[in-house]
């Protein structure tokens, strides 16, 4: 294999061994092998499964839609586009069909586990919009709590007293994952309602007042979230498949 030409640069032939050395020197060999193993595993799965077949009509319609969207309806302009992108119709057709099969494979692998995975991850997917005032002593925190209860502006007090950078936006933290909150804060928020004032609570040597602005519960009806979780499940499955492969790098 050492003498096999892998690449030609300025009419000089580079052997597989030379290419591997260059990849090693650049620190990219592991990534290169990983990409090869990923593509190999995907192609093997797609070829050996009957539940990811896609009709040719679906592929043809997708190509028609692509040509319409990119103003490539004229055959000459389409051929020029194919040439410019280093491909031909057969390879382009195969690529489109493969992308459909890959999406179908993702669905077949991930959908049966999606609901259970969503429940496992839900504490991290649920978010709460919070505002906060962070000070360095309990007495001040308790005084600010009293002032807010008596009608003082949370926003004004946040700008004046809070020690965190978000004081410049009235203490608004924005959406926070329930799973990343300190336990003591999450326990209070779980029984609170929008508008509730929580605290003072001691957190990492400081004292905080928190106002619940809005709850943002996660749902699988959110197509973007559902798709992201499917991708996570698929990548986990793929990584496990690749990990079980026996790989030998055959370069002298």
Image: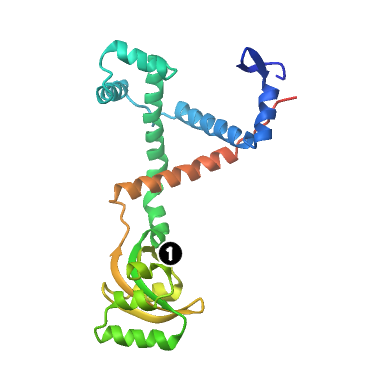
* Quadrant in the picture for residue 147: bottom left
Residue 51, compared with residue 77, is above or below; it is below
Image coordinates for residue 110, horizontal then vertical, percent: 41, 44
Q: The C terminus is located in which quarter? A: top right
Q: Nearer the viewer, residue 60 or 244?
A: 60
Residue under the point 37% across and 70% down: 167
* Quadrant in the picture for residue 192: bottom left
Whether residue 107 is visible:
yes
Q: The N terminus is located in which quarter? A: top right
Count of picture labels: 1
In this figure, which colouring scheme has been used for the structure? rainbow
- Mark 1 surroundings: few (<14), some (14-19) or many (≥20) residues within 10 A: some
Residue under the point 67% across and 22% down: 16
Element assignment for label 1: helix
Q: Nearer the viewer, residue 192 or 100?
A: 192
* Quadrant in the picture for residue 118: bottom left
Q: Is residue 182 left or right of residue 245?
A: left
Residue under the point 44% across and 65% down: 180
Q: Nearer the viewer, residue 108 or 149?
A: 149
Q: Residue furthest right?
A: 252
Image coordinates for residue 235, horizontal then vertical, percent: 48, 43
Q: Is residue 246 left or right of residue 131?
A: right
Whether residue 210 is visible:
no
Q: Is residue 86 left or right of residue 226?
A: right
Residue 93, compared with residue 215, is above or below; it is above
**Residue behind mark 1:** 179
Image coordinates for residue 88, horizontal then vertical, percent: 41, 14
Q: Is residue 177 left or right of residue 223?
A: right
């Amino acid at each position: 294999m050492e003498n096999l030409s892998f690449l030609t640069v300025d009419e000089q032939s580079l052997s597989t061994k030379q290419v591997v050395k260059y990849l090693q020197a650049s620190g990219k060999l592991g990534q290169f092998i990983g990409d090869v193993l990923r593509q190999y595993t995907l192609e093997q799965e797609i070829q050996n499964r009957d539940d990811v077949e896609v009709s040719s009509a679906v592929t043809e319609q997708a190509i028609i839609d692509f040509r319409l969207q990119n103003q490539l309806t004229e055959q000459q302009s389409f051929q020029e586009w194919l040439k410019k992108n280093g491909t031909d119709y057969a390879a382009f057709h195969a690529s489109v069909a493969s992308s459909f099969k890959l999406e179908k494979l993702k669905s077949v692998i991930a959908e049966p586990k999606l609901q259970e995975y969503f429940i496992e991850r839900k504490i991290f997917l649920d978010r709460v919009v919070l505002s906060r005032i962070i000070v360095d002593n309990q007495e001040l925190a308790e005084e600010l709590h009293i002032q807010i209860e008596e009608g003082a502006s949370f926003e004004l007090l946040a700008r004046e007293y809070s020690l965190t950078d978000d004081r410049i936006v009235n203490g608004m933290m924005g959406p926070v994952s329930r799973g990343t909150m300190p336990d003591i804060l999450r326990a209070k928020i779980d029984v609170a309602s929008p508008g509730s004032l929580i605290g003072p609570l001691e957190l990492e040597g400081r004292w905080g007042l928190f106002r619940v602005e809005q709850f943002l519960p996660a749902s699988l009806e959110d197509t973007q979230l559902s798709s992201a979780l499917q991708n996570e499940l698929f990548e986990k499955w793929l990584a496990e498949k690749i990990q079980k492969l026996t790989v030998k790098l055959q370069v002298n």
